[in-house]
Amino acid sequence: MIKNQLLLPSKLMDLSQKLIKTTIIEKGRDYQSLYMLEFSNSLKYVLKEKNVEDSGSLMDEAERLKWVNGIIPAPKVISYQVENGKEYLVMTYIEGCAAEEYQQEEGQKSLGYILGEGLRTIHNVPINNCPFDDFSPKKLIDLVRKNIKERKDEVINVVNNVFPNYTIEQLTDLLEMNKASEEELVFTHGDYGSGNVMINKGRIEAFIDLGGAGISDAYYDIYYLVKSLTYYTDRKEEVEEFIKGYGISELDEDRMKFHQIIDALLL
């Protein structure tokens, strides 16, 4: 009998091998279900499942995973399907632990340094033929302006709490003044937190959750990684190690401010 029985769409994947076990993975976004599938031939896969009507689309992730295949380490897409109001995405299983759980052992690099090296690898991906630019600086500013127009009371409340010494107009001026130029744009992960990097034996095994990957500026990732280390996981001591691993002397505070404003005003 299969542990944690899960009904899969008939055409989702080759079921010639017997599915012997499904395990719910606790990590992941609250609007997605995440499972590990184990088959009789010892192969393991990860299945993401979500309602079509919920935020985002697993197709975005599938398309990006296919685009980065062979370019950076990431899960490979086995199949994607929509059936009965649900999206399903099956990917190869990645061994190791999420970076947020990594504990440095003797002879291994620090967490921050590993994450810095990893992000540099992502940012070095050529963007000539990249079709994804949903979160370019210009489009991020456009989304903020849309919120200001359509949800002004909520935006005012955030500004009063987070930026009490600024007006909305001053913040949007700062965004325009500090946005990266076209020449400075790179390929970005889009959600580069320490929970979205898999580490195995002290080295990066894969980057995961790439549904927001695409062309933006480097600080789109750097800002979120610093926030991940200082706010979500309380590993602020790793920020300096990240800076070394990434290969810069210090953080650009203007760019960090740009993404702090974006982060807050996107609500």
Image (cartoon, grey):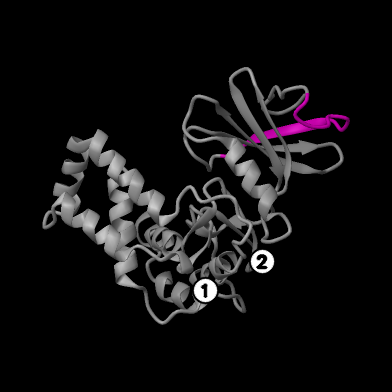
Characterize the local packing of mark 1: few (<14), some (14-19) or many (20 or more) Cα atoms within 10 angstroms. many
Query: Would you name the residue on which mark 2 appears?
Result: 201
Q: Is residue 67 above or below residue 174?
A: above
Q: Mark 2 or mark 1: which comes first in sequence? A: 1
Q: CA distance from mark 2 to mark 1?
A: 15 Å
The residue positioned 12% from the left and 54% from the top of the image is 164
The residue positioned 16% from the left and 42% from the top of the image is 156
The residue positioned 47% from the left and 35% from the top of the image is 30
- 141, 8: nearer the viewer: 141
For badge 1, the amino acid type reads Tyr
Residue 65 location, x and y as percent? Answer: 66, 49
Q: Is residue 140 above or below residue 126?
A: above
Q: Horizontal placement of 161 versus 262: left or right? A: left
Question: Considering the numbered disc 2 on the image, is that residue within a helix, a strand or a loop?
Answer: loop
Tell whether position 120 is magenta.
no
Characterize the local packing of mark 2: few (<14), some (14-19) or many (20 or more) Cα atoms within 10 angstroms. few
Query: Would you name the residue on which mark 1 appears?
Result: 113
Q: How many marks?
A: 2
Q: Horizontal placement of 256 versus 35: left or right? A: left
In the image, which residues are magenta?
Answer: 11-25
Q: Horizontal placement of 63 versus 123: left or right? A: right
For badge 2, the amino acid type reads Lys
Q: Horizontal placement of 186 versus 257: left or right? A: right
